[in-house]
Image (cartoon, grey):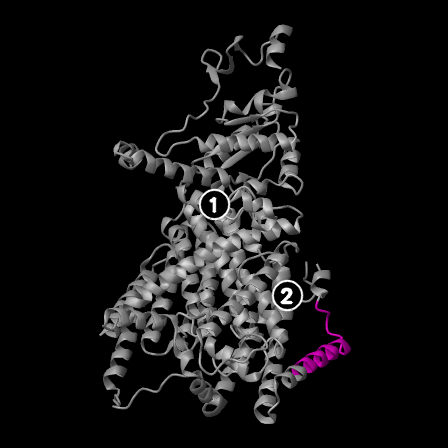
Amino acid sequence: MDLIKKIPAYIERIPNGGILMTGLDWVLNNAKASSMWYMLFGLACCAIELMATGASRYDFDRLGMIFRATPRQTDLMIVAGTLTLKMAPRVKLLYEQMPDPKYVIAMGGCTMHGGPFYHDSYSVLKGVDKIIPVDIHVAGCPPRPEALLNGCIALQDLIKGEKVGRQRDRPGLRHIDPSTNLPLLVRPDTGLIRPNQILMPDQLRVLS
Amino acid sequence: MPEWVQFSAGKHFQDLIAHLSGRSVPEILVMPIMLAVILGFICGSSLILIWAERKVAARIQNRVGPMMTGPRKLAEFSMWTGGLLQTAADAIKLLVKELIIPSKTDPVPFIAAPVLIVTVCVTAFVVIPFGPALSVSDLNIGVVHVVSISSLTVLSIVMAGWSSNSKYSLLGGLRSAAQMLSYEIPLIFALLGPILLAGGLSMQKMVLAQREYGCWFFLPSLLGFLIYYVASIAEVNRPPFDIPEAESELVAGYVSEYSGMMFAMFFLAEFANMFLVCSVAATVFLGGWLVPFMAVPEQMTPGYIALGTLVFFAKTSFLVFIMMWIRWTFPRVRPDHLMNLGWKYLFPLSLLNLLICAGVAVLKDVYKLNGWGVSLASLGALVFVLLLLQVVRVPRPTAFLEKV
Amino acid sequence: MSEAIAFYVLSGLVLASAWSVVRNENLFHAGLSLILCFVGVAGIYVNLDAPFLGAMQVLIYAGAIAVLLLFGFMLTHDLMNAKQERNQHAAGIFAAVLMALVLIGTIAGAQWYGSSGQPVKFGVESLARRYMQQDLVSFEVVALLLLASLMGAVVIARKEEGSRD
C-alpha cells in the first residue's frame, strides 16, 4: 500500500508529469469541494442556524451540500453547539466513523473555547479542537447562516489547495499539560493559559 | 408481428460487426458488450436523474438547488441550468472516499450485496424496448423477466441489512422483506391485465398490441396502471414507502454502514430501478414508443425510430417526474399501513382489474369493438363496480388510515 | 457445445451450493446458499429452453420463499452466532441413500422416448392451453387445496375473540 501512496510523487518526477498531476488535483479537489455532505446532527442552539442554512432561504444545496444521517457517507462534520463533556466521546466516535478525507467545521463560540460557559461550567468542553482536529472555526453566538456559508466556502478553498498523495496539513489538537493532564490553550501573545485558571481583565481582552 | 420487431440492439450490433469484419460473431461475445452498454446507460441516466431529483426537490421546497458546480454562465441563466456537473462531482468524490468495512461485519454478504443490486438492475434492463427494434434482447417472457429479476433486489437489501451487524441496518432489512410481501403480489396482478389484453409476455408485443387495440392500455386497465404505479414506488423504496431506509428512525436503514463506492452502487441502483419501473409502466400502460396520433409506418424508417425513442423517453421521464413529485410531497407511511394497503385494498382491486381486462379482451375479440369503445366499456365497468361497493357498504379505501 | 458447458457449470454450482446449505454452520450463509441453488436450477431451466419456468423459479423460490426464510432467520435470537444443529447425521444419511436408490431405480427403469422431431417452440400460450383446457380439473383442485391451506393458516394465526390486547 505504501507503494501506491508514493505513485503520485513518482509521476511528478517524470518530465511533464507535474502537469498531469495538477490536472488530477484540480478534478479531485473540485469534486471533493463541490460535494461536501455534512452529518445530520446538532448539539445546541447553533443547530437551529444550521437548519436555517439548509432551508430554502440560504440553501446549502447550492454548494452541493446535502445532509446524510450516517457518518459513513459524510465528508464534513459541522459541530453546531455546546459540546458537553458527556457528549464529547460520542462526537469523537462519530468523527472516527467518518471515512477519509474528512473535515470539521466548529460552529459558534462554544465549540471554539466554551463560549458563555468558559468560566464557571463544570460540564462543558472548552473547545472541540481538544478532541477532534478542526479545519474551520466560525465565530458567533450563534453565527448567522451567512457566516456558516462563508465558513463552508473557506473550507472549499482549503480543499482546493490540497495535493494528491501528499498528506494534508491537518490542524492539530490543543496541547495537553502532562503535569495536570489538562488541555492548555496555546496563544502566541500570552503564552499558556489553563482553562480553569482565573483570568485577569487584560488577559480576557486578549481572548475576546 | 412485423419482421423488424424481431431485431434487437444485440442483433444489430452482431450484424454490424459481421459486416465490418466479414465473419460472423458468436452471441457469447456480443452479450458482455451489450451488458456494458446497459451499465453505461444506467450510470448516465442516474447522473441525470439524481441532478433532476435535487432540482425538483429544490423547486418544490422553494429553493434553487445545486448551482455552483458546473458552468457558472449557464447557472446565471436560470435555476434549471445550474449545477449541471453536481452528480459527476458527487460520483468522483465517492470514488476517492475511503472504503470502510467495519470489523464486525460478515464480509462476504457485505461486499456481495451492492454488487448483486447493480447486477440485478442491469439484467432487468435487457428486455426494455427503448424504441422500435431497440431492446437489447426481446425475450418472449419479457414482463415476467423484469418482475422476477427485480424481485431479487430485496435479497440484496436483506443481505446488506444482516451482514452490516448493526441494529439499524438489520431493521431496514427486516422491513424491506416485510414490505416486499405486501407490494409484490399487487404488482404482478396489476401487470396481468395488460398481459391478458396483449396475449403475450414479450415487451415489444405489448407495444404492438396497443397499436392493434388503438388505445394505450392505461385506458382499459386504469386500475391496473394506478396499482402498478403505487406498488412500484414501494418496490424502489422511495417515499412515501421508504420504510427500509427511513432517515428519521433508522439512520439510513440498510445502507447505514456502507461508505464510498459501495454506497454509490446502492445509490445508483435506486435511481436505475426507478427508471426501470417507470419504463416498464410506460411500455405496458402508456404505449411504449408509440407516437400519439401517428400511425406506425409499415416499413421502419430511421426517422420513426428516432421519434419513437424520443417519445419513449418522454413518457418515462414524465412518470419519473411524478415519482419525484410524490416523494417530496408526501410523508412516510407506517409499515402496518403499507401492509393494510397492499393486502386489503390493492390486491382485491388488482383482481377486479383482471376481471375487467378479461371482459375487455372478449369485447375486442368477439364483438370487434375499437379502442375507444373498449376503453369506455372498461371505465364504465370500473365506475359501476366502485359505485356498487359504495352501496353494499364495504370499508372506504381510506379507512385503514383512520383505524390506528 | 456451449449448452453442455453451461449445463456442467450450472450443475456444479447447484451441487456446491446445495452442499453448502447442508454443511454450513452459519444459518444465514446456508440460507444464501439455498438461494444460489435456486438460481442455479433456474439457469438449468433456461438452458433447457424453458425460460418461463426459470423466471418463475427465480420469482417464487429465490425472490419470495427464500426471502421469507431469511426473514425468519433474522428474527432469531443472537443472530450473528446462529448455528445450525447437526446431530441427525444417521437419519440424514439414511434418507439420502434411500432417496438416491429410488431415483437411480426410477431413472434406470424408465423408458426414454427419443424423438428426431424439433422440440416444441415454447410459448406461454401452450402452457395456458395445458392448464386451462387439458388439465383444468386438476388445476382447479390444486387451487382449492391451496385456498384451504391458506384459510387454515388464517384460522391458526388468528387470536381468540376477546384476547385482543
Residue under label 2: B341
Residue in the picture at 71% in, 77% down: B386
For mark 1, name the chain.
B
For mark 2, name the chain.
B
The correct choice, above or below, for A190 with respect to B222 in the image is above
Q: Which of the two residues, B386 or A84, is positioned nearer the viewer here?
A: B386
Q: CA distance from mark 1 to mark 2?
A: 36 Å
Q: Quadrant of the N terminus of chain B?
A: bottom left
Residue type indicated by callout 1:
Asp
On the picture, is A26 further left or further right than A146? Answer: left
Which quarter of the figure has residue B22?
Answer: bottom left
Image coords of residue B275 (percent x, y) = 51, 62
Residue in the picture at 34% in, 59% down: C86
Numbered circle sitting on residue B90: 1
Is B379 included in the stretch rendered in magenta? Answer: yes
What segment is highlighted magenta in the picture? B378-397
**Is label 1 in contact with label 2 (beta carbons under 8 Å)?**
no
User: Residue extending furthest bottom?
Assistant: B366
